[in-house]
Amino acid sequence: MDLDLLSNILFAMARTGTPLLLVALGELICEKSGVLNLGQEGMMLFGAVVGFIVAFSTGSLWLGVLLAIAAGMLLSLLFAAVALGFNANQVATGLALTIFGVGLSSFIGAAWVGKPLAGFEPLAIPLLSEIPLIGRMLFAQDALIYLSFALFVLVAWVLLKSRIGLIIQAVGENPDAASAMGLPVLRVRTLAVMFGGAMAGLAGGYLSLAYTPMWAENMTAGRGWIALALVVFASWRVFRVLLGAYLFGLASIIHLVAQGVGLSVPSNLLAMLPYVATIVVLVLLSRDAIKTRLFAPVSLGKPWQPGH
Amino acid sequence: MLLSLEPRGQQSRAMLWLSPLLAAVLTLLCGSLLFLLLGLSPGLTLHTLLIAPISDWYGVSELLVKALPILLCALGLAVAYQARIWNIGAEGQLLLGALAGSAVAVNVIDWESRWALVWVLAAGTFAGAAWGGLTAWLRTQFNANEILTSIMLNYIALNLLLYFVHGPLKDPEGYNFPQSAMFGDMARLPLLSDDGRLHSGIYFALLALVVIWVLLQKSFLGFQIKVLGLDRRAAGFVGFREKSLVWFALLVSGALAGLAGVSEVAGPIGQLVPQVSPGYGYAAITVAFLGRLNPLGIVFASLLMALLYIGGESAQLSLNLPQAITQLFQGMMLFFLLACDVLILYRPRMKAVWKKRLVGKAAVA
């Protein structure tokens, strides 16, 4: 494998890893606050379809991105209302959100399937993008990928350095104590869920406006679910989320690597790889039940109402 | 909020069964609103969607044909969900059943005996159970979250099916279409009548219904499953073996989904095609919850879901609505159901502020 190929693989890895990174960062904040939202796939799809329709009809890609984010947040509010407001089972509510999002996006997107759109173009930063090996990966990407770098820094700073991060974690570890200290548990959780929705919407918008600028039913192909596994893989730690997202990105462009070394494997079999990798990773990381429990936010997925 | 929730202290039996009805009504209301926004007459659209498709015998038989795989999958899911094992993998288990059944069927095309059908059905059921068993193995052996593994196995099963239907199982005389050869007559489920596509798979569904009903409502095994679902620790204290129960629940639900899949290819379709299932395995999740994880409730819920499927098809043909309306209604219904379920444990009350104001007014009067 020569350097050029390797640089191309790294470039593609960041592109395929970005939607996973965005969703997983959102879900990380959400789970840190104690809420398990399995609706990522649905929110992503809704973001993708709304972003595409808006960008296609107005001609403005950024307006598309903005409304993709809004779309994700809108669906996350539905989740918050049912799971937090009405105390419903979070697993079932998240599933409902995904089923609903799949149906809603296919329904409103039916007339837009296969329409062409000029999506985000790569913006190469002079000089920096010519650094060997990692130059193209880091500095010759499109605007949304640069945005994902910034969002990663933001989430890392919030979780590791800020008061907001402490509040989120207090609410996720022990809502009773947090509430006794005067923290508005349900409001913090709702905001965390909304942040997750915004990130999933953005990830969807990235898919339909930059990664493959078009709309197709179910175009997320399970990325929302893989991102959920990623958070477990990362043991709820933000730097590991980044690492995991790019590793999974690598797994889904393995056909490039295979071509590079001259292998030919049927495409449907290669397409399985990210899913197989997810299972393998879950197995490797969950084997130690006690350790998994130590890393997970203590009240993850447990309903909570004030005064009970 | 003007309403506040007050704990009832115990489950309301009435709300347990009223909630799905309420959810269905709310879905219809929301759907009507949607049709109005789209400039369609709600009455006419709902008629096309829900009544016209079953206004003749052929329509009713199509309803049963569609309800069959959904019912089989949902019965299996009910067993798993009663134990709080979140098997989302019915779709993959169904697809693998269809794949394995087809792999046998194309090799027994010229058989003259009914053993062909037996082998095809057995292969499909077994493969579905094995796919469910894989989830059980990952869960019991490695503690891997079954929601995520079973979802991943869905995607893997779909890609396996696509690989086989484009490759090893493709009909050599099929003009390069991605489909297998048509199965031999002896490997097909016999039709029940000359008009319509209703086939003898319906007997399996009835059998499964009785077996799962007895299992869940009358057997000690079913009791163990329910206890496990209600309280894992309690189940451990009284000595129920969690691992065996997890295996059992996932094997049963996998086998039933596999049977559903193989019944589709050996029944109405007659060959392996890429679109074996329009999401039956996912629809079954909604159906299982809507039917309250109760076998009889699931029968009604799967008929309703099947109606949405054929209604979606007819709405596409006559009103040019996207067929995804089926999934949209599915999602809405599950959402409304979960929201209405709050009424099982809580009683809605007007806020005290309002009461005081009302009392105050009454006093003035």
Image (cartoon, rainbow, N blue to C red):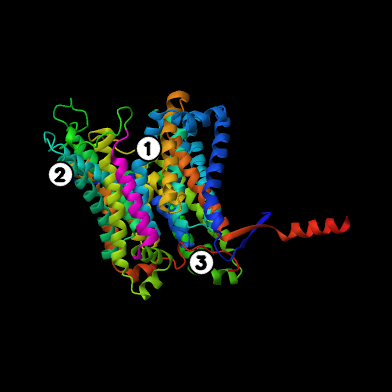
**Disc 2 from disc 3: Cα separation:** 47 Å
Outermost residue on the right side: it is: B365
Instruction: Tell me the magenta residue range.
Output: B198-220
Amino acid beneath label 3: Leu
Instruction: Name the amino acid type tagged 1.
Output: Leu
Q: Secondary structure at mark 1?
A: helix
Q: State whether discs 2 and 3 lie on one chain.
A: yes
For label 2, the SS is loop
- Tell me the residue that label 1 is attached to: B64
Question: Could you tell me which residue is drawn at 49 percent across and 62 percent down?
Answer: A33
Expressed as whole percent of the image width and height from the top left, the position of residue B344 reads 55, 58
User: Are there few (<14), some (14-19), or many (20+) residues within 10 Å of tag 2?
Assistant: few
Most distant residue in the front direction: B193
**Label 3: chain letter:** A
SS under mark 3 = helix
Placement of the C terminus of chain A among the 4 image quadrants: bottom right
The main secondary structure of the magenta stretch is: helix
Residue A97 image position (x, y, % from top left) = 46, 48
Residue B168: numbered disc:
none
Q: Which residue in the structure is indicated by mark 3? A: A166
Q: Circle 2 is placed at which residue position? A: A261
Residue mark closest to the camera, 2 vs 1: 1
Task: From this view, report whether residue B138 is shown above or below residue B264.
Answer: below
Distance CA(mark 3)–CA(mark 1): 55 Å
Where does residue B9 sit, x and y in percent of width and height?
58, 66
Magenta span has B152? no
Image quarter for residue A109?
Answer: top left
Between A63 and B16, the residue placed more toward the observer is B16
Q: Is the residue at mark 3 from the same chain as the one at mark 1? A: no
